[in-house]
Amino acid sequence: MRFGPRVLYTHPAVADPLLDILQRYWGYAQFRPGQREAMDAVVQGRDSLLVLPTGGGKSLCFQAPALLRPGVALVISPLISLMKDQVDTLTAHGVPAAYLNSAMAPDERRRVMQGLRERRYRLLYLAPERIAGEGSTFVPWLHEAGGLSFMAIDEAHCISHWGHDFRPEYRQLGALRSSLPGVGLHAFTATATARVREDIVAQLGLQDPVTLVGSFDRANLLYRVLPRHAMATQIRQILARHRGEAGIIYCPTRREVDALAASLAKEGYRVRPYHAGLTDDERHAHQDAFLNESVDIVVATVAFGMGIDRSDVRFVIHAGAPQSLEHYQQEAGRAGRDGLEAECVLIVSSGDFLRWRDILSKNGELTDARQGLLRDIERYAASVGCRHRRLVSYFGEAYSKGDCGACDYCLGELEAVPEPATLARKILSAVARVGQRYGAAHVGQVLRGQLSEAVRSRGHDTLSVFGLLREVSVDDMRGYTDQLLAFGLLRQVGDPYPVLQLTEAGAAGLRDAAVLDGLSLARQRKPEKGSGPKKSRVEAESWAGVDRELFDQLRGMRQRLARERGVPPYVIFHDTTLRELARLKPTSLPELREVYGVGARKADDLGPEVLRVLHGG
């Protein structure tokens, strides 16, 4: 079952227990798309699979029903940091929750176990390793001691060999099915193709599950792809639009992470590195600093991200291509979890994909499936068209919008090249004329008519293709070459200095222009002097009517309260709520309870302080 972007349920006149819980504990007056159906499946005891992109309110789909069903809900979560963040947030909302993990002190574990015996919790978070190790005795005990309400498996794509983040310990979870008859089993993930969804159902032994697949479109994210030409400059141009805002920069290697983090720190940015080469203590400290807003930027390898619950990440930069569109959607999706505007920039070159193929080949992992995943992300980077449309289409979803208003193409930052087939044949011809024995830089020099020593010494200045594209810039030339590589007309071979060669399709296109019908090539449109990148429609709308000065004061209040209580600031309020407060300026506790994300518990707890900031006193 799929559901669209419209709001499915609003506050009804008749009693609705789930909606009452949603408003009383979380301060939400309506369900997001798909939430109601997912919650109903849990409440009714049906097995289910929910695929809902990051920021869509996935966790709420098992948290809210846990307050309605008797007993304790068991949540399987892959990371200690994710457990702690979610339990802290639930506790702040007045929901009795706890976790058990290997990092806890013995007295903490005893306290939680006693709480389970006394049936004080409605949710318990566990790692899959604990289930795999002692689950055969612990879970049945839990079922008898507290009455197991249901099991929710978060990040369920980890169970699939076809998923982008396979974890062997997840495979053990299916064995629990036979030992817990009558207990509903629910799988939740933000990213899963149809093949992965089928594997999740099979591996967990889900019985006649309710399958819900939400829209993969994150309309609040602004997607840009930049051909790499001066990485350091490109990154700093992006950071200049996000001064003082939270963001993540993904780099391919630890060395690049350390170098960039050190460089940015010298320039005054509040930044920390994160990768597997750091000690556990260093990684935890840097992650906590980011979550607590002591730093704004984390420069990281892909080791960073899963379980990061900071909702106000306003940008994610990929300084190099990830392995697949699944990886990209998951990593870029860590921006804008609060539903507000965020920018996702992929800085890419054809060398990224060559490097991935080399790494996977050396590791014996370059299967046909992995090759296909690389081709998909390569074509996304080179595509001429709406980025939102391309992403959702990859996951099998029809995209009904015309202009998304939130990508480089729809904002007019890219322009289609006239006569792309003619341009492509000139580049293909140059590759052939130099004997298919030179790299992209040399081919570009020949086409642009550059009399470099390498060109002159090899006599390539006498070729018929010399100077055919004198008017094309170095950056645009590299971009066109990368696009022809992505479309399978060229390939790169050799290491460490790859050369360009024609593929069979490229050779056919060189012989017959009709083969290239339908080809589209694009270049970056040069911005008008004094103008910067455009803002998305979502950004313009989200700030409408907001008192910016008041918003900043509310952020200061949130930071202070978070430090006093020892929790991350987003546990107090999300930015979405702060903007609503600065827009609506409620004057009383009843009015405050109606503001998105406040709810009765927080209005009673924090209301006087919020009203003081809003109106003085």
Image (tube, rainbow, N blue to C red):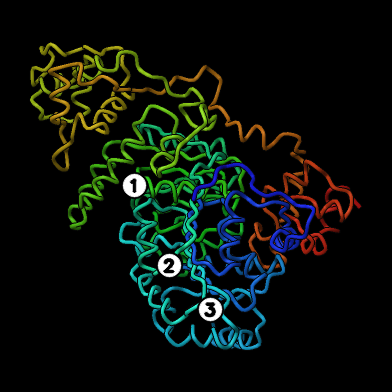
Report which quarter residue 163 is drawn in: bottom left
Image coordinates for residue 93, horizontal then vertical, percent: 70, 65
* Amino acid at circle 2: Leu
The CA span between labels 2 and 1 is 27 Å
Quadrant assignment, res 579? top right
Disc nearer the start of the sequence (3/2):
3
Q: Which residue is pictured at 52% across the width and 31% down the height?
A: 401
Disc 2 target residue: 206
- Closer-to-camera residue (123/525): 123
* Callout 1 crowding tier (Cα within 10 Å): few <14, some 14–19, many ≥20: many
Residue sitting farthest toward the front: 208
Task: Locate residue 464, reporting x and y percent.
Answer: 12, 11
Q: Secondary structure at mark 2?
A: loop
In the image, taking residue 599 as reference, residue 523 lies left or right, namely left
What is the secondary structure assignment of the residue under circle 1? loop
Front residue of 13 and 57: 13
Against 539, residue 76 (above or below) is below
- The x and y percentages for residue 354 are 23, 42
- Residue at numbered disc 3: 100
Circle 1 sits on which residue? 324
Q: Residue at x 57, y 74 (%)?
A: 73
Mark 3: give few (<14), some (14-19) or many (20+) Cα within 10 Å.
some
Left or right: 465, with 553 as reference point = left
How far from the left and from the top, in percent, is residue 233? 43, 34
- Identify whether 143 is placed above or below 286: below
